[in-house]
Amino acid sequence: MVSNRIIFFLFDGVHLLDLAGAVTVFYESGCCGQPYELRYVSPYSHPATSSGLGFAAVDPLDAVTITAQDIIIVAGMELARWNREDDHLWMPWLQAAAATGATICSVCTAAFALAAAGLLDGHSCTTHWAWTSSLQKQYPRLKVLENKLFVKSGKLFTSAGIATGIDLALYLVEEQHGAAFAYMVAKDMVVYIRRDGTESQHSVYLQNRQHINYQVHQVQDYIAHHLQHKITIEDLAALVHISPRNLTRLFKSTTGSTIGQYVQQLRQEKAQHLLKAQHKVAWVAKECGFKGPDQLRRFLKKAI
């Protein structure tokens, strides 16, 4: 049975993007034709984000009766504000939800809550890269995987945090409504490409965006959204109003990659995703800017 209810669990000190990223995916799913009922619960009457923003329309935990079809997403929180003296306020509820067969997900540091409740014992899991060692040390019965965007173990999902909550949510949408629909939601959100849990937290796209040069960011955004077209350095240079020679130098010094290498890496990454989603080779080749299926096959074979 397909669930249409997503229950977001908020600790006090919840990280805003850990919550909002996943919320937006399911909201946009509704805009694209597959609506979800979104509920927000907390053991606290007035939880606030780690950045100080407070919430009003949040229900107490006992206001929602959990079923096996529900999806519960526990958003990451500031661990320094996580009051373990309040375990009795939320832990039995989360354990009971898991016992009903509901899907339980954590974003970022919320993996610590799932671990504390014993839900992750014997399971593979992950969290933000800065906390993987600490999670493994505190909970030795877990198998904490590093450098993963998210990990699925039965009906338990753990994600690396922040933006990877979007990847996890898109995966859940894809499980229910198919790859083509999830791709449409991602496109509607202007997300470059949906990544899955087998990938590194450091994708080609993200590795080359760890800089603050707005002109290079603008070029990278253009490339990512026009891979199906012929891309010339002259056109990119005109886009940011500098000479092709200066753009070539600036791009390489800023990202460590040439423009040509960057374009090919993104085309490879996108093609692999679309092929994995069972799209036809001819369509994938066209969508990724290759001359035809044969060129795509040669390129991917060379890239192995």
Image: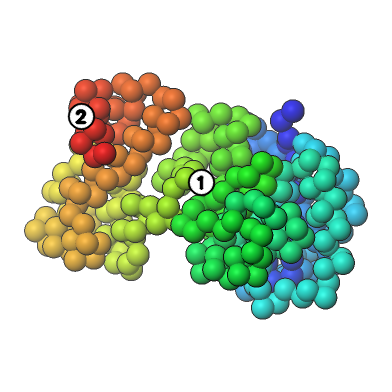
What residue is pinned by disc 2? Answer: 298
| Residue 277: image location, x then y, percent | 45, 30
Residue 16: horizontal and vertical position, in percent?
62, 64
Decide which of tag 1 and tag 2 comes sooner along the chain.
Answer: 1
Q: Is residue 75 visible?
A: no
Q: Which quadrant is the N terminus positioned in?
A: top right
For mark 1, does the 10 Å Cα neighbourhood hold few (<14), some (14 to 19), or many (20 or more) residues? many
Residue that sits furthest to the bottom in the current view: 80
Task: Please report contact status of discs 1 and 2: CB closer than 8 Å, yes or no.
Answer: no
Query: As displayed, is residue 256 above or below residue 189?
Result: below
Would you say 53 lies left or right of 130 here?
Answer: right
Instruction: Answer above or below: position of 208 versus 131.
Output: above
Q: CA distance from mark 1 to mark 2?
A: 27 Å
Q: Identify the residue shown where x is 70% and y is 77%.
A: 81
- Quadrant of the frame with the C terminus: top left
Q: Which mark is residue 197?
A: 1
| In front of the other: 194 or 35 | 194
Name the residue located 49 percent from the left edge and 35 percent from the top edge.
Answer: 183
**Side of 4 relative to 290 (left or right):** right
Q: Residues within 10 Å of mark 2 (few under 14, many from 20)?
A: few
Figure quadrant of residue 264: top left
Q: Nearer the viewer, residue 156 or 280?
A: 156
Q: Quadrant of residue 12?
A: bottom right
- Identify the residue at image location x=49%, y=53%: 148
Q: Between 36 and 110, which is closer to the camera in this rendering?
A: 110
Helix or strand or loop: what does disc 1 sit on? Answer: loop
At 66% from the left edge and 41% from the top edge, which residue is drawn? 154
